[in-house]
């Protein structure tokens, strides 16, 4: 990393939470505006299950009805987003809904853009601290980073990030870790291609069926 890049990274790390939130809000303004418009049209009831994160959440067609035992399921995924974005935008993505449970899938894009597993842990901790400060009764479940075949070069970092976050989760009864990563590997430890569409990045209908099965066990009251 050259000196200019290092200085920019250091400045961003030291930026205030407000500055980071404003930058993220500008970047994702169309998506956030669409969420706000949907909320005005049909305000979700508080106390539901809120799914937030990147395109794996955004593209989960039928998510709102995938868990019929849950009276309120809200989908707020925005494609291409990072775990850092979810942490920066908690006040827009989570707090207005007052959910009983937040299910978060994010981090894969961070790694693809050069973030370290330790960076992901830091972003997740920020996300958790903000939610727990404002909504202490709300539980948070982290969906492990999936082993996308198109991102095999990041597999070691995925495993490390998952382990760091899982270890953090184990120390707090209000947190949960949902391991979809292991279920998406074959007997030889390779990603199962049938769980993905042609780009080998996004999930197929079979992939979402597996997620529904794994996640459902974690949506306890």
Image (cartoon, rainbow, N blue to C red):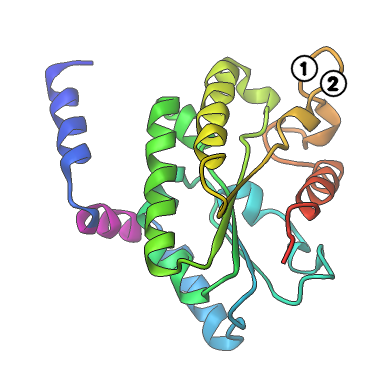
Q: Nearer the viewer, residue 21 or 143?
A: 143
Residue 9, can we see it?
A: yes
Most frequent secondary structure within the magenta stretch: helix
**Secondary element at image label 2:** loop
- Quadrant position of the C terminus in the picture: bottom right
Residue sitting at x 73%, y 59%: 219
Query: How many numbered circles does the render carry?
Result: 2
Q: Which residue is mark 2?
A: 186
Residue 32, can we see it?
A: no
User: Residue 59: horizontal and vertical position, in percent?
Assistant: 68, 53
Please indicate whether residue 217 sits to the left or right of residue 123 in the image.
Answer: right
- From the viewer's perspective, is residue 43 above or below residue 72? below
Residue most toward the top?
188
User: Residue 132: horizontal and vertical position, in percent?
Assistant: 43, 61
Q: Are marks 1 and 2 in contact (CB under 8 Å)?
A: yes
User: Residue 30: horizontal and vertical position, in percent?
Assistant: 44, 65
- The segment highlighted magenta reads 18-26
Please indicate whether residue 89 sits to the left or right of residue 181 in the image.
Answer: left
Crowd rating for badge 2 (residues with CA inside 10 Å; few <14, some 14–19, many 20+): few
Magenta-span inclusion, residue 39: no
- From the viewer's perspective, is residue 153 above or below residue 194? above
Q: Which residue is mark 1?
A: 190
Crowd rating for badge 1 (residues with CA inside 10 Å; few <14, some 14–19, many 20+): some
- Quadrant position of the N terminus in the picture: top left
Residue sitting at x 52%, y 74%: 98
Q: Nearer the viewer, residue 128 or 183?
A: 128
Using the numbered discs, state the Cα–Cα distance from disc 1 to disc 2 in whole angstroms: 5 Å
């Amino acid at each position: 990393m050259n000196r200019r890049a290092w200085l920019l990274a250091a400045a961003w790390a030291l930026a205030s939470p407000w500055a980071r939130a404003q930058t993220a809000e500008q970047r994702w303004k169309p998506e956030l505006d669409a969420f706000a418009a949907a909320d005005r049209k049909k305000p979700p009831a508080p106390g539901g299950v809120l799914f937030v994160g990147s395109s794996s959440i955004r593209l989960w067609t039928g998510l709102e009805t995938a868990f019929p035992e849950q009276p309120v399921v809200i989908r707020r995924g925005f494609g291409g987003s990072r775990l850092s974005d979810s942490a920066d935008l908690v006040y827009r993505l989570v707090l207005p809904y007052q959910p009983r449970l937040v299910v978060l899938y994010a981090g894969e894009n961070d790694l693809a853009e050069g973030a370290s597993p330790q960076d992901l842990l830091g972003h997740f901790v920020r996300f958790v601290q903000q939610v727990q400060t404002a909504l202490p009764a709300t539980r948070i479940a982290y969906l492990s980073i999936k082993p996308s075949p198109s991102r095999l070069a990041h597999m070691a970092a995925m495993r490390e990030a998952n382990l760091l976050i899982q270890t953090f989760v184990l120390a707090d009864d209000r947190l949960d870790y949902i391991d979809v990563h292991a279920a998406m590997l074959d007997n030889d430890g390779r990603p199962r291609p049938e769980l993905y569409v042609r780009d080998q990045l996004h999930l197929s209908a079979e992939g979402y069926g597996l997620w529904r099965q794994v996640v459902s066990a974690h949506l306890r009251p």
